[in-house]
Amino acid sequence: MNAKIAYILGSDSDFPQVEKGISLLRSLQIPLQVEVSSAHRTPERTLQLVREFEAQGVEVIIAAAGGAAHLPGVVASHTLLPVLGVPMTSTLSGFDSLLAIVQMPAGIPVATFGIGAAGATNAALFAVSLLAAHDPVLKEKLQAYRAEQREKVLEKSRELKDKLDRG
């Protein structure tokens, strides 16, 4: 089955920060593809990947990059597909990455998420939400995931109360 969501990482060193989101997509059985390509070092490859994703029927691209994080913007400039930009933690705690992604010029939108692993997980969930808008089976899976998250919080609350009651 062709990928519905494609990742482009600016470097393989970004993988640990996006790994949880990728695992989440796999647990929801969403076909995905993960590639490494640099907006600066391999611009032709980046463009080629975007063209391949479009031809293969990918519906959402998640682009993660750190430092001078131009990758999401470069990807967005070559496609009409939704591009979700994830700033990676970098030498300036990811603030440089965040500003590089969030400050896109008018006309080339990139949906930008928080810095690092939490942002990467939210980007994955947002991509699922986009797909679930027209896929009732996936919508049910997303609802079940959210219910599971709620139950985990309630369980942690019960555990804490029990611990405090035992004194």
Image (cartoon, rainbow, N blue to C red):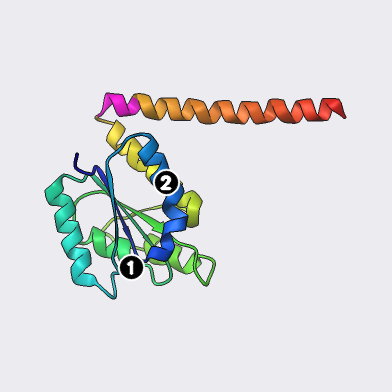
In terms of image quadrants, where is residue 74? bottom left
The quadrant of the picture occupied by the N terminus is top left
Kindly identify which residue carries mark 2. 21
Badge 2 vs badge 1, beta-carbon distance below 8 Å: no
**Residue 77: x %, y % from top left:** 22, 62
Please tell me whether residue 90 belongs to the stretch shown in magenta. Answer: no
The image position of residue 140, as x and y in percent, is 36, 24
Sort mark 2 into few (<14), some (14-19) or many (20+) by Cα contacts within 10 Å. Answer: many
Q: Is 66 on the left-hand or right-hand side of 70?
A: right
Q: Which residue in the protein does label 1 denote?
A: 70
Whether residue 107 is visible to the viewer of this picture, yes or no, is no
Residue 38 visible in the shown view: yes
Q: Residue at x 15, y 55 (%)?
A: 52
Q: Tell me the chief SS of the magenta region.
A: helix
User: How many residues crowd mark 1 within 10 Å: few (<14), some (14–19), many (20+)?
Assistant: many
Q: Which residues are magenta?
A: 135-139
Q: Does residue 64 lie above or below 121 as drawn? A: below
